[in-house]
Amino acid sequence: MAHQAGMPRLHKVIFAILLAFLIVLPFLVYPVFAMKVMCFALFAAAFNLLLGFGGLLSFGHAAYFGGASYVAAHAAKVWGLTPELAVLCGTLAAGVLGLAIGFLAIRRQGIYFAMVTLAFAQMVYFFSLQAPFTGGEDGIQSVPRGDLFGLIPLEDNVALYFFVLAVTFAGILFLYRIVHSPFGQVLKAIRENEPRAISLGYNVARYKLMVFVLSATFAGLAGALKSQVFQLSSLTDVHWAMSGEVVLMTLLGGMGTIFGPLVGAAIIVTMQNYLATFGAWVTIIQGVIFVIGVLLFREGIVGVISRWIKRPL
């Protein structure tokens, strides 16, 4: 695919419709639920950058999501930082953690790479369980939402919703830009044929590390936002099941597509929300839907739609 100078009209239309829909959404559904969907959509989009475009399967993305969540919650509650600074602290912490883990992980390939990321994520989980500032099994609770830029109080769910919307939407547009930049094109070349990319003179290890750090940073941004939304940071966010969940969202929506992870995240969060009354059965229902999805939509929901209309989505 040739590098495109501007955003295709179809993508502009989809983004415009999506933004219009999200602006009215908090008046139609419970704002906290809508914010949860957005946080996970950003998390899935960040993961898709690594898997869908970089061709690297990480089983440890909960480390950045949850790690940033803890740092942001601690920054807001203990250091008394304003929400945007707390979120920034969490995001930067995830980026640094991604750099440290990525530097060691990218030396491996395939399943070994996936296992190394999982091992590091488990270390982050045990650290979160034992470290004094994380609150152990209780997590960090009652995180104050504070005032945005010291001016706009975010105690009101709708006010917080528009802050989360602005950050999430900007994050997704930034990820879109990365994918459609020359850097994104090299990533796709490495994914398709790594030896050829090496023979063309690209420093493949550096590209892999860059995409790993970018993916970890945006996953951290999603986690930091989530800690503000729920005023809580807990072990669930760093658990290996969270890493599995984001893989599920990306595959169900469509790996390597722009809008797939957003659709996958929306479906899974909605299912968890509305099927919560079934208790433990949720995981079984989720599993069945995933199996059906994989069998019927091999390329994910958006991937199949993209093939039907013969346009990349």
Image (tube, rainbow, N blue to C red):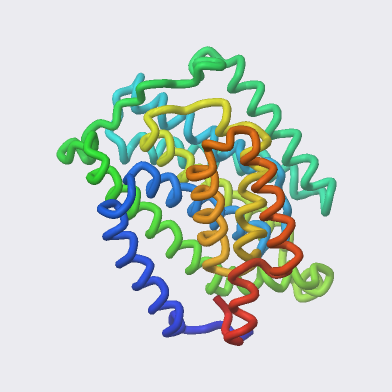
Is residue 178 shown left or right of residue 18? right
Judged from this view, the residue extending furthest toward the front is: 278
Is residue 196 shown left or right of residue 81? right
Residue 214 visible (yes or no): no
Quarter of the picture holding the N terminus? bottom right
Judge whether 39 appears above or below 17 on screen. Answer: above
Judged from this view, the residue extending furthest toward the left is: 151
120, 18: nearer the viewer: 18
Quarter of the picture holding the C terminus? bottom right
Is residue 276 shown left or right of residue 114? left
Residue 94: x %, y % from top left: 53, 39
178, 279: nearer the viewer: 279
Judge whether 279 appears above or below 312 on screen. Answer: above
Residue pictured at 72% horizontal, 63% vertical: 203
Query: How many numbered discs?
Result: 0
Residue pictured at 52% horizontal, 12% vertical: 132
Residue 288 visible (yes or no): yes
Q: Which quarter of the figure has residue 15?
A: bottom left
Residue pictured at 31% horizontal, 40% vertical: 84
Judged from this view, the residue extending furthest toward the top is: 132
Residue 293: x %, y % from top left: 69, 62
Residue 297: x %, y % from top left: 69, 69
Judge whether 182 appears above or below 59 on screen. Answer: below
Residue pictured at 54% horizontal, 57% vertical: 45
Residue 152: x %, y % from top left: 17, 40
